[in-house]
Image (tube, rainbow, N blue to C red):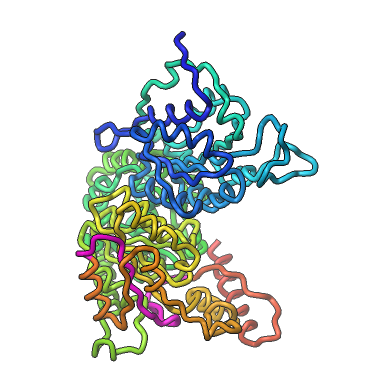
């Protein structure tokens, strides 16, 4: 057996560079690059190894560890999980800064390889800088924080352990059911330790996305349930995109006349004006989709976790006797909510169902009702996203809905909108008119504030030929904005619209809906907050971006036109109304209200909450 002597870090980098993937029939590197912020714990080991591999495995430097890992998550999402990025940090706060990003990847079922440095496996210099000393367990380090948010976690205390751990890591990262973050904690002395590696370990390996077909019995049961349904509804989730099942979904819905509602991750599976498209579903859903969900006699959920925003905290699918079929590649998800499971790849499952249901169509009256409701919803979207009458004088502050309309009109058919937490995702889910399967990129599984700009950078790296429009509130902007500088440094242009409503407007509205008084959310409700005036445009310019503040929707539209011609990242700032929201659509969300309070408004909110819970229990 031929061997080659390499350090553990050199072997790891060589192995990653040898991994291959298949995208639309074309072979490509599985790892598109490594994000690295070096410190004492990875600069000497992995840093040296990455320098030698810089042509086959590019290294990118960011300004914040959490941000670079979020960019890697967004990159994998935009590439439909077919291509991955890795991230390496030093051993202390650099490592723990990535825990949030690991949680995002875990919740959203996205591949992410984390390579944090670790303390000395040999322990001779203990305690080293940034080492956390557990009084009862000397093996504990900050990297143990990654255990609950990793699909596969390992600490490499001997170089040869990589022979088993790296193939297992690749299996998790590329498996459609197990997919999620992998953490390999790398003690700094082990990174530098040499070993004689089998040359065969570094042979190129091609990873094709597995697409399992359905079990015959589960397929027969699901097909029989659908054949008996007269008012079926499809709920399309992110799995439709990840499996490449957009065309299969369109064929199935069109052939069988079934309306399609979309989750946040599933949005864009059908073009917004497709005859079977009825819009978003759930807490942030359209009135069309939610009305159909309440009346449906069968729901076919495709590639979705059915989290509480999708099911309106299990209150949405209210019809007695409703049957739920869960088509999902992960058995864990397929059996949720007492569903009839159909464990399979989304595309293969839909095609198999279509074959089994040849000649069957939903009740024509049901399909017609879905069309009527969708058209009615379209008029709502037209109205709330239109510029204010009278121009800038039409309303004192622009609404989120009007800003979304302006950005949507400025975006081309293949451009991408990126957003994450706060009030914007709800309005975008309802109102954004997606025309392309990759045109809507929201992180709303973990609802991670700070994802927006970093995520936009990852999307731009994955889809360089598209304009990427980032929409971000002032709260999220202040949490994480450093990757504006990275986007300029890397030449990855973003068009960022900052909606400044002076605080956390979404949570301020939720606070009041639960009977609370405005407190600690909007700056005007915080001692000294009224005097705070952040010049976001000046800040963005200091990071290297082009930037301007606009005073209304008309000015915003003209600024967006200019942004298209810009040669680097552009930041546009607009003041918005923190109280305005789309009244139409939406559904109940279970947010517990205090049982006792001195305030009458809270007691009233609790009474409404108790009534909603009783209705939910009555539904069973």
Check the image and name the residue furthest to the right.
136
Above or below for 119 versus 515: above
Q: Is residue 314 visible?
A: yes
Give how far across and how far down residue 578 sits, in percent.
44, 80
Q: Is residue 267 left or right of residue 619?
A: left
In this orientation, which residue lies closer to the viewer: 538 or 304? Answer: 538
In this orientation, which residue lies closer to the viewer: 465 or 64? Answer: 64
Assign the magenta stretch its main secondary structure: loop
Check the image and name the residue furthest to the top.
1
Q: Is residue 8 magenta?
A: no
Looking at the image, which residue is at 43% across and 16% down? 199
Give how far across and how far down residue 223 sits, in percent.
35, 43
Looking at the image, which residue is at 46% across and 16% down? 4
In this orientation, which residue lies closer to the viewer: 597 or 187? Answer: 187
Q: Which residues are magenta?
A: 564-587
Q: Is residue 468 left or right of residue 134?
A: left
Query: Which quadrant of the view contains residue 424?
Result: bottom left
């Amino acid at each position: 057996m031929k061997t080659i002597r390499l350090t553990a870090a050199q072997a790891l980098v060589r192995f990653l560079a040898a991994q291959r993937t298949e995208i639309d029939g074309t072979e490509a590197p599985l790892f598109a690059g490594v994000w690295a912020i070096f410190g004492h714990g990875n600069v000497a080991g992995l840093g040296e190894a990455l320098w030698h591999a810089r042509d086959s495995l590019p290294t990118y430097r960011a300004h914040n560890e959490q941000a670079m890992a979020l960019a890697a998550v967004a990159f994998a999402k935009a590439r439909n999980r077919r291509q991955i990025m890795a991230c390496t940090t030093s051993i202390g706060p650099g490592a723990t800064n990535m825990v949030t990003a690991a949680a995002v990847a875990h919740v959203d079922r996205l591949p992410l390889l984390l390579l944090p440095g670790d303390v000395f496996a040999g322990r001779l210099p203990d305690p080293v800088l940034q080492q956390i000393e557990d009084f009862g367990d000397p093996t504990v380090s900050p990297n143990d924080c990654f255990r609950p948010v990793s699909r596969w976690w390992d600490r490499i205390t001997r170089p040869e352990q990589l022979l088993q751990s790296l193939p297992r890591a690749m299996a998790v990262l590329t498996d459609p059911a197990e997919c999620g973050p992998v953490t390999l904690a790398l003690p700094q002395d082990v990174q530098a330790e040499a070993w004689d590696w089998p040359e065969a370990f570094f042979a190129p390996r091609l990873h094709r996305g597995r697409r399992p077909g359905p079990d015959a019995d589960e397929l027969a049961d699901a097909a029989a349930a659908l054949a008996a349904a007269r008012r079926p509804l499809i709920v399309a989730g992110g799995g439709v995109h990840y499996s490449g099942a957009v065309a299969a979904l369109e064929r199935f819905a069109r052939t069988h006349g079934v309306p399609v509602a979309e989750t946040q991750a599933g949005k864009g599976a059908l073009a917004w004006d497709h005859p079977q498209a009825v819009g978003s579903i759930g807490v942030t859903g359209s009135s069309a989709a939610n009305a159909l969900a309440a009346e449906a006699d069968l729901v076919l959920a495709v590639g979705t976790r059915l989290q509480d925003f999708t099911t309106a905290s299990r209150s949405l699918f209210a019809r007695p006797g409703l049957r739920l079929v869960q088509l999902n590649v992960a058995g864990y998800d397929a059996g949720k909510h007492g569903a009839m499971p159909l464990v399979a790849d989304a595309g293969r499952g839909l095609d198999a169902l279509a074959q089994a249901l040849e000649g069957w169509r939903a009740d024509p009256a049901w399909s017609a009702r879905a069309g009527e409701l969708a058209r009615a919803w379209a008029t709502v979207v037209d109205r709330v996203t239109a510029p204010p009458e009278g121009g800038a004088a039409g309303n004192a502050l622009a609404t989120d809905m009007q800003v979304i309309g302006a950005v949507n009109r400025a975006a081309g058919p293949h451009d991408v909108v990126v957003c994450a937490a706060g009030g914007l995702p709800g309005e975008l889910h309802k109102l954004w008119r997606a025309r392309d399967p990759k045109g809507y990129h929201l992180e709303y599984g973990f609802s991670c504030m700070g994802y927006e700009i970093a995520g936009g950078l990852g999307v731009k790296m994955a889809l360089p030929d598209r304009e990427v429009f980032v929409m971000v509130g002032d709260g999220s902007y202040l949490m994480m904005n450093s990757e504006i500088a990275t986007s300029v440094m890397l030449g990855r242009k973003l068009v960022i619209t900052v909606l400044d409503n002076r605080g956390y407007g979404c949570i301020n509205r939720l606070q009041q809906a639960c009977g609370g008084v405005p407190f600690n959310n909007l700056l005007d409700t915080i001692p000294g907050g009224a005097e705070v005036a952040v010049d976001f445009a000046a800040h963005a310019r200091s990071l290297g971006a082009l930037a301007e503040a606009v005073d209304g929707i008309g000015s915003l539209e003209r600024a967006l036109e200019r942004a298209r011609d810009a040669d680097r990242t552009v930041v546009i700032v607009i003041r918005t109304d923190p109280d305005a929201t789309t009244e139409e659509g939406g559904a109940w969300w279970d947010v517990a209200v205090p049982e006792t309070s001195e305030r009458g408004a809270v007691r009233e909110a609790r009474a409404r909450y108790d009534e909603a819970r009783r209705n939910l229990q009555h539904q069973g």
